[in-house]
Image (cartoon, grey):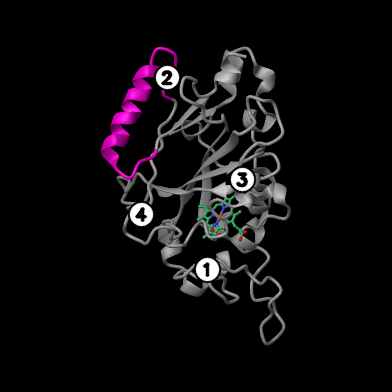
């Protein structure tokens, strides 16, 4: 379980000024088609499990406990491949069939710690993080009809292995300077992973995507996509500039639409006898 604090929580405890500006309001991006029913929120409960049964139980108990002080704004359900369907540590696939998460900072690395955890800031936030959640609809029917080469060039990674289209194996970097026999670049500057790649350590984030599938609709069309979640020490220097580049020229925008958005402060964990958020809520 992960808990997140949105702007209204800071307002409710009389600490409005403590809510980071980027959590209060993410900038609008030109490709946004956000729907209020999938956006915003003042308290996030992210409940994850390999098994639906305990998940249902835990969520119900949490919501029951909060019922006297809060109402449910939205619920979004996401999934990944079942545990055990691939060897542990395998990068998951999204509904486009891509391995999604390859270039994430490695588990346990200093790079991951630097990207995710707040080091400088008010004491109640140090050791915490920020979460950006985007509900991104994926037009899987038209993606299906697009050829394999095109799909791979749109991201600059292969569909089967996740390796760069410029060669190597999954965890190799994309060689953006590689040219073909006529001297043309092999990968486009507008390929998703090329554009999204961090241009400074401050842009790094940990992406943990979950697919959603609430379809098919009555018309028989899909209602599915990605619950994009990214953890970062500061969304203002990570998610915001990266998404600004993607909104401007990502080739994948042909098949994806951001329809929901929310940002939260993730307070640090707590020890026995304390509770999550205590340093903020009792301060
Ligand atoms: C439906 C929407 C999206 C899909 C299907 C998607 C898919 C992918 C895939 C397949 C990769 C290459 C493998 C990997 O490194 O994970 C990738 C890389 C990446 N994506 Fe996305 N992505 C989506 C949205 C986003 C958004 C909204 C952001 C951030 C604003 C983002 C940031 C990144 C980053 C930082 C990388 C790694 C780039 C690198 O360093 O090589 N993606 N994405």
Looking at the image, is mark 3 or mark 4 earlier in the sequence? 4
Looking at the image, is mark 1 or mark 4 earlier in the sequence? 4
**Residue 47 lies in what quarter of the image?**
top left
Q: Is residue 65 magenta?
A: yes
Residue bearing the label numbered 3: 113
Q: Nearer the viewer, mark 3 or mark 4?
A: 3
Q: Badge 1, how many Cα within 10 Å: few under 14, some, many 20+?
A: some
Instruction: State the residue at coordinates (43%, 30%).
Output: 74
Residue bearing the label numbered 4: 81
Residue bearing the label numbered 2: 71
Looking at the image, is mark 3 or mark 1 earlier in the sequence? 3
Q: How many marks?
A: 4
Q: Badge 2, how many Cα within 10 Å: few under 14, some, many 20+?
A: few
Above or below: residue 210 compared with residue 180: above
Report x, y in % for residue 200: 73, 53
Residue bearing the label numbered 1: 170
Q: What is the magenta segment's predominant secondary structure?
A: helix
């Amino acid at each position: 379980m992960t808990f997140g604090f949105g702007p209204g929580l800071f307002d409710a405890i009389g600490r409005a000024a403590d809510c980071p500006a980027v959590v209060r309001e993410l900038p609008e991006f030109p490709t946004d088609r956000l729907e209020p029913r999938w956006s915003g929120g003042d308290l996030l409960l992210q409940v994850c499990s390999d098994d639906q049964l305990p998940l249902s139980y835990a969520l119900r108990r949490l919501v029951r406990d909060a019922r006297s002080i809060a109402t449910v704004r939205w619920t979004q359900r996401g999934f990944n491949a079942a545990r055990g369907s691939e060897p542990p540590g395998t990068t998951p696939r999204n509904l486009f069939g891509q391995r999604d998460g390859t270039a994430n900072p490695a588990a346990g690395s200093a790079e991951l710690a630097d990207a995710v955890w707040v080091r400088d800031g008010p004491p109640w936030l140090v050791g915490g993080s920020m979460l950006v959640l985007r509900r991104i609809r994926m037009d899987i029917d038209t993606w299906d009809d697009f050829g394999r080469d095109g799909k791979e060039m749109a991201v600059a990674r292969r569909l089967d292995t996740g390796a760069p289209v410029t060669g190597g194996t999954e965890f190799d970097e994309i060689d953006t300077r590689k040219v073909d026999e006529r001297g043309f670049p092999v990968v486009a500057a507008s390929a998703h992973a090329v554009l999204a790649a961090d241009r400074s350590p401050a842009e790094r984030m940990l992406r943990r995507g979950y697919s959603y599938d609430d379809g098919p609709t009555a018309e028989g069309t899909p209602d599915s996509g990605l619950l994009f979640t990214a953890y970062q020490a500061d969304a203002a220097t990570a998610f915001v500039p990266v998404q600004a580049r993607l909104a401007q020229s990502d080739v994948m925008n042909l098949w994806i639409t951001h329809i929901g958005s929310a940002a939260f402060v993730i307070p640090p964990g707590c020890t026995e006898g304390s509770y999550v958020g205590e340093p903020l809520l009792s301060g």
